[in-house]
Amino acid sequence: MQSGPTGPPMPGARQLARGITATWWYTLTAVMAFEVMLVVAWTAVAVIEGQDSIARIVVGGGGLVWCASTVLLLRAYRHRDDAEPGIDWRLLLPPMLVAVAFGAAAGSLVGSWQLALMPFAQSLSLLNWPRGVRYRVTIAATLVLASLAYIDSSRISVPDEGPWWLAVVYTAILPVMTVSSLWWWDVLNTMDRARAAESRLAATQERLRVATDVHDLQGHHLQVIALQLELAERLMPVDADAGMEQLRAARGSVDDARQGTRDLAMSFRSVPLGDELANARDLLSAAGLEVEAQIAADAAQAPASALGPVIRETTTNVLRHGGGTRARLALRREGTDWCYLIANDRIAAGETDAEGSGLEGIRRRLAEVGGTLEVQREPDEFTVMARVPARPTTGEGTR
Amino acid sequence: MIRVLLADDEGMIRSALAALLRLEEDIDVVAECEDGEQAVAEALRLQPDVCLLDLEMPGLDGVEVAERLHRAIATRCVVVTRHARPGVLRRALASGVAGFLPKSRGADEVAAVIRRVAAGGRYVDPEIAADALSDERSPLTDRELDVLRAGRRGETTGQIARSLSLAPGTVRNHISTILGKLAVGTRQQAVLVAEERGWI
């Protein structure tokens, strides 16, 4: 709820997005490494076959140009989910032409049909094929490359040295290896998208729930207020006192509506007890008091539902009066109890009725969970101490 | 007689509140202002006992007005708000605001607070205090907040560095720490997050 689509992303989401990016670079590196190794292997074949330096340069240099051209294909692949289905030929035609040109030149120089078709087959398998078609393309490319290897071996005399076989086998399995790398990337990408969709859905549902709550709440109160005002309008000429009574009731209804709205808004806010105390300390020092705070390290375990209101009420009391110069805050564990203490140096005489009733309310609420409240009024210090069992008899956590 | 200045950009609320306060025997509304600049000017001219300032006003907000007046004259400021963004109370207390009220309080309660504040007391509404206490903690240090504040209008790193007397490299370090803590991509986003939560 806190961060809808307009809010900042949660740190976890950001980390995941970073993880996705890292996976992409890993995939890209793997595919490029396959291709570069293959180019090196075929260049080695050209060297062993005793080709002249032009052929070596064509196979090696041209191979690197082809490798670079496949980066464009991979880039298009990465962003394919955001693009229209199908293939954008304006962008992808140049790399495909590079693949065909390199295949034709290198294949004819080395005298291998397999090398001639390999770049095109690889570039083809990098295109954004619809689901299902890509696997057929891969299988077809593998079969074609394997059968061309067979044709090559029957047509030309095969040298005994390793690179030839390395290059031939490696070429035949290149499309499969490439597509399996991309498949892994697809899996992670789908998971990432599913997670994003899930959090969007959760945020939408929450928003709908809040909208319904607000609508019900306001609708009800506005209807009551409208009726009370109408009644006042009718009564005024005949019975002014009764009319006034209705006006006062309408004012009360407005207060109820406001309080209800506020409670609804507050129900989405909850902070750990430690943060609440830290806020109290900050507020008191902002108000010019010298604050001494002793907060237990495991304050988060204290019953927030019981102590939260105590902290709010007592801090407000201190803030309200001002004039003091020192305040002491403490939250600590004493045996099986949690003990919260707030003291300040104001003169106790300044206490108002509202404040006394506030403290009474707190005493009642604490009693409900088996806790106690002690108030000490000394000439130079006013202390409130609340004590709650570590395991209250009613639920904790939510306020 | 307590002389009161009223500043609120919503005309209906301002005039209704002024009329209600004038009904009180011991309160006299000496000025009604519709924005922060006007409130500062009028307050300096009239030297009222109490200034009742709306927090949300175009230009200077209520706390900024209170800050300026606090330095210049001996008037007491009460800030009124519809929605107390977390962090505002802290800023208000630090700049010497004597009272803080939600807008929903009736005129009789406002009058009581004005009397109390005029007599030298301080009043912080329990609702506002509850909001401030259940406030999300800012993960940023004071220095980092200074950097965000100095750059909130799109100032360059160099300008921020000059205004805070820091080295540009230090400012850049602070900014990258801020971006990491808030998990956002740009300084503008960090400023938006911090403003939304009332940290700056």
Image (cartoon, rainbow, N blue to C red):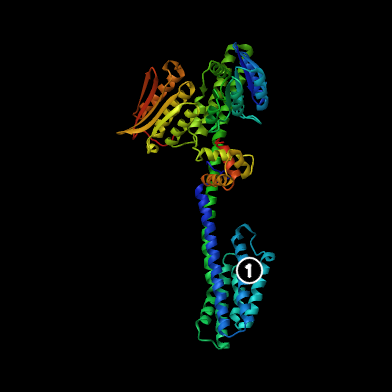
Is A236 in front, or is A72? A72
Residue beneath disc 1: A69
Q: Residue at x 65, y 22 (%)?
A: B14
Estimate the x, y position of residue B56 in percent, counting from the top left.
62, 30
Is A253 in front, or is A163? A163
Q: Image height check: is A132 above or below B104?
A: below
Q: Chain of mark 1?
A: A
Amino acid marked by disc 1: Ser
Query: Which quarter of the image is occupied by the C terminus of chain A?
Result: top left
Estimate the x, y position of residue B172 in percent, counting from the top left.
57, 46
Q: Quadrant of residue A239?
A: top right
Estimate the x, y position of residue B124 in percent, counting from the top left.
51, 24
Q: Residue at x 56, y 81 (%)?
A: A45
Q: Image height check: is A242 above or below B193?
A: above
Is A317 in front, or is A144? A317
Q: Quadrant of residue A231?
A: top right
Is A185 in front, or is B177? B177
Q: Image height check: is A32 above or below B68?
A: below
